Amino acid sequence: MKTKLPASVRLSDEIPGYPVFEIAHPKCTARVALHGAHVMSWCPADEEEVLYLSPDAVFTEGKAIRGGIPLCWPWFNAHPTNPEQPSHGIARTRFWGLLGAEEDESGVTIRFGMEEGIWKAELTVKAGAELEVSLETLNTNEIPIVVSGALHSYFSVSDIGNVRLVNLEDADFLDTVGVSTLRKQKGAIEFKGEVDAIYDSPGKVLLVDDFSGRTILIEKGGSPSTVVWNPWMEKATAMGDLPDEGYRKFCCIEAAIANDKAVIVMPGSSHVLSTRISVEE
Ligand code: BG6
């Protein structure tokens, strides 16, 4: 890797053939894998870890890391027309290229890129007192392309029974547990069983953990949908890369573009899907 890294970034080769950028900056520590341009960890100074990473996550080319921030791109969930294509797209299961890395007093910025066929993307991670992740889809083709996806963020919680999500009250959502049903959210979201839901909401979400007393603010850009997911017990037990009780330790809140909200990107233009995560004072 020829790009020069700033002093607060170290390239770890602890997992052979699987480079991980380790950030140790006065504002935060963080880890980002080259595989999937995948943020695995972010811990602002004087705070606890914000993201959940499964202790059973698998680090090998072609397998998405369970936890952190997987990039679902250029489609969300199943491919819109071809069931042979992988769920959640091609970005999370391949190595990206490093485009650059810089630091200043506010944090560290690392940029990654990938290109395959008609698809071209750049991912910018800015880790400091806040974490900003921006996924830019660039259309370098002569025809429009249709993109969806998600920044599939796994947040660490004291216990899933202790948390509520605020600011999606009254939002319409597609409940995809069992037969997909359109519903309207009443009050804050609480987790009492499997949750898999696509909210029509371009705005922020607050994750309130009533046990730890911590509130995490999740802001979004270029994201008409917010996906909320927890697999609960039965599905977690069936996952080889998540401990049976692991579902109690996280919830996913995803800055997403899903289903009929897919974005058309015209030739020569781009679309940015982003999230900014901060711990509330
Ligand atoms: C969520 C979807 O975004 O991702 C769920 O809404 C899906 O339906 C989940 O189960 C996890 O997907 P995967 O492929 O990482 O196990």
Image (cartoon, rainbow, N blue to C red):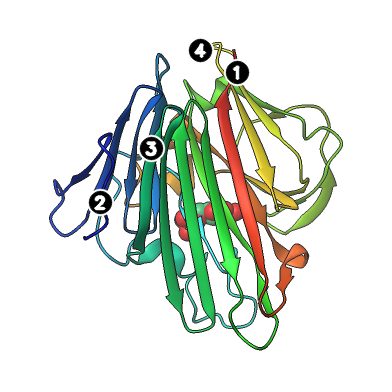
The disc at residue 212 is: 4
Residue 54 falls in image quadrant? top left
Q: Is residue 99 above or below residue 27?
A: below
Question: Dot 4, how many residues are within 10 Å of its Cα: few (below 14), some (14-19), or many (20+)?
Answer: few
Say which of 147 and 198 sits in front: 147
At a point 30% along the width and 47% down the height, the residue shown is: 57
User: Can you give x and y, in whole percent of width and height, for residue 80 in the image?
Assistant: 64, 76
* Mark closest to the chain's N terminus, 4 or 3: 3
Regarding residue 4, the answer to whether it shows in the image is: yes
The disc at residue 280 is: 1
Q: Is residue 143 above or below residue 87?
A: below
Q: Nearer the viewer, mark 1 or mark 2?
A: 2
At a point 59% along the width and 66% down the height, the residue shown is: 137
Question: Dot 2, how many residues are within 10 Å of its Cα: few (below 14), some (14-19), or many (20+)?
Answer: few
Circles 2, 4 touching at the beta carbon (< 8 Å): no
Say which of 101 and 257 sits in front: 101
Question: Disc 4 residue type?
Answer: Ser
Q: Ligand 1 within 8 A of label 4's CB? A: no
Mark 4 to mark 1 CA distance (whole Å): 13 Å
Q: Is residue 219 left or right of residue 92?
A: right
Write down the residue under mark 3: 103
Label 1: element kind: loop
Question: Disc 1 residue type?
Answer: Glu
Furthest residue in direction bottom, as rendered = 142
Mark 2 to mark 4 CA distance (whole Å): 39 Å
